[in-house]
Image: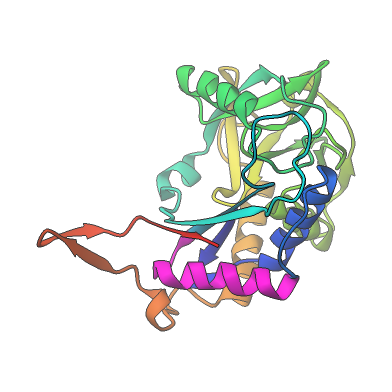
Amino acid sequence: MVRSYHGVLFRLDEHLDRLAQSAKGIRLPLRYSRSQWRRLIQRAYALSRFSEGKVYVQVTRGPSPRDHRFPNHVRPTTVVTVRRLDPLASMVREHGVSAVTVPDLRWGRCDVKSVNLLANVLAKEEARAAGAFEAILVRDGTVTEGAVSNCFAVINGAVVTSPTDPSILPGITRALAVELIQREGIPFQERPIAVDEYRRADEIFLTGTTIEVLSVVSLDGHKVGTGSPGQIARLLYDRFMAVVADECGPSSKRPGRRGIARRRKTDGRPVDCLRRRVVL
């Protein structure tokens, strides 16, 4: 999923890289070149006219009779969905969120971004039932990532996160966070992390396309660090937003038609244009 800021899609090329890598991982042919993907996604986004939006691209092998074998001579189907993005409430970011640990029941190729999300959905629902914002997934005593996010912990002054192996989805925001950590000269480790280390961490934070950099202040009902968003997470969020401003322009920028979320009328009554779907 790609998001926009102020009418500009953020790091589209990195998302297209991951699309290509994921398709290769499951031997799914892609119909379009890089430049064609860019035009198609930008066209769908422009049609939405949302200043702040999220674009979801879904590719299937194409229509065929039900069978476990790959179909022959079918044309892949691409669907691009654009929705208006409502940014995270400032109070949520200011106070931080809670999380719970949940067993990681996903398949072995979590580095492939696919629609195989049932285990993520069940984990997220378990978090919701517990009154938590996110589920932090644990496999064999080791934290992998969140149900819808990547996870970081600050341990003895170093930022630690799970390695980029098949147990996690390599997030675009995660990659930028790692870049910013290294740019700031903060000690950084990419290694397996035991869930007990997370429970003793000075800080925990999440990264993701829609949440950006978000502090976790409570894990399994116990306070994380001081119980408030930590210094490193706050610094990284500020640096992240500086990158957004540099690449997408400041918040005052409202370019052209697509920079304004418009309204249309149905039966004479105005309604919000929350979603546009383009089948290509």
Instruction: Find residue 77 and report its horizontal and vertical position in percent.
Output: 61, 53
Residue at 75% x, 70% y: name it.
Answer: 33
Residue at 34% x, 68% y: name it.
Answer: 261
Q: Is residue 39 magenta?
A: yes
Q: Which residues are magenta?
A: 34-53
Q: Is residue 262 left or right of residue 122?
A: left
Instruction: Find residue 56 and report its horizontal and vertical position in percent.
Output: 56, 53
User: Nearest the camera: 165 or 87?
Assistant: 165
User: Nearest the camera: 215 or 62?
Assistant: 62
Q: Is residue 6 visible?
A: no
Determine the residue located farthest toward the left in the rendered image: 268
The picture quadrant where one finds residue 75 is: bottom right
Q: How is the image coloured?
A: rainbow
Instruction: Find residue 222 and report its horizontal and vertical position in percent.
Output: 59, 19
Q: Is residue 159 left or right of residue 239?
A: right
Q: In the image, is residue 192 above or below residue 89?
A: above
Looking at the magenta stretch, what is its main secondary structure? Answer: helix
The picture quadrant where one finds residue 274 is: bottom left
Where the C terminus falls, by quadrant? bottom right
Residue at 68% x, 41% y: name it.
Answer: 114
Instruction: Find residue 180 and report its horizontal and vertical position in percent.
Output: 76, 59
User: Nearest the camera: 90 or 112?
Assistant: 112
Q: Is residue 37 magenta?
A: yes
User: Nearest the camera: 166 or 173?
Assistant: 166
The picture quadrant where one finds residue 268 is: bottom left
Q: In the image, is residue 158 above or below residue 202?
A: below
Q: In the image, is residue 230 above or below residue 17?
A: above
Residue at 75% x, 28% y: name it.
Answer: 68
Q: Is residue 147 left or right of residue 50?
A: right
